[in-house]
Amino acid sequence: MKLGKHLAAEPMTLQLAPFIDVILFLLIFFLLTWNTARYEAELGVRLPTAQQAETSTRMPGEILINVNPAGDIIVNRRTLQPAELESILAKVTKDFPDQAVILRADASVPYQKVIAVIDICKAARVGNIAFTTAPPAASP
């Protein structure tokens, strides 16, 4: 009676198809998110400068509200009327009460227009509003 009969083991092979699928999905995801972030930053909004400006990374899910020099409100490359913005924010905050909103207003936009956007956010019950600024230009 032979108890320890050894069978010839098949050589192990690396399955590349699932690995390639995952890599392609990650590549597509990063290309799409990078493209969106790039367009949001290229809207021609010249940010005001601040001596104490801190660099921070944008978190996924944050709503970026741009106010261009003409005073237009732009979200996801769409120009919105104040009522439309309030409706969108109200729907989002209903499902996500702690939703973060980032306000990017051009330095030449009248202060009253910025306050109007803040009022819209408050009417939609947004409690987490952040402002973006640019660091001062470096002296030569």
Image: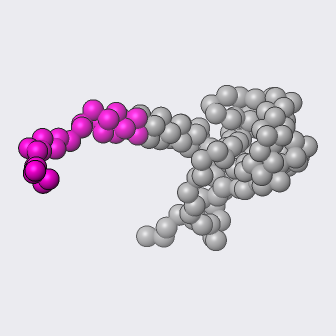
Q: Residue at x 48, y 70 (%)?
A: 139
What are the residue bounds of the magenta stretch? 1-26
Residue found at the very far front of the displayed protein: 1
Residue 58 image position (x, y, % from top left): 58, 52
- x, y percent for residue 137: 53, 63
Relative to 50, residue 79 above or below: above
Tell whether position 100 is magenta.
no
Query: Vertical placement of 98 versus 21: above or below?
Result: below
Q: Quadrant of the C terminus?
A: bottom left
Q: Is residue 8 above or below residue 140?
A: above
Out of 5 and 80, give the one closest to the viewer: 5
The answer to whether residue 80 shows anywhere in this view is: yes
Q: Is residue 5 magenta?
A: yes
- Residue 114: x percent and y percent? 80, 47
User: Residue 14, located in which quarter of the rendered image?
Assistant: top left
Q: Quadrant of residue 127?
A: bottom right
Q: Which of these two is toward me, 60 or 18?
A: 18
- Report the side of 44 relative to 125 (left or right): left
Tell me if residue 50 comes above or below residue 69 in the rendering: below
**Residue at the image position 77 percent from the left and 52 percent from the top:** 98
Please give the name of the residue rendered at 24% of the width and 37% of the height, measured from the top-left corner: 15
Left or right of 82, for residue 4: left
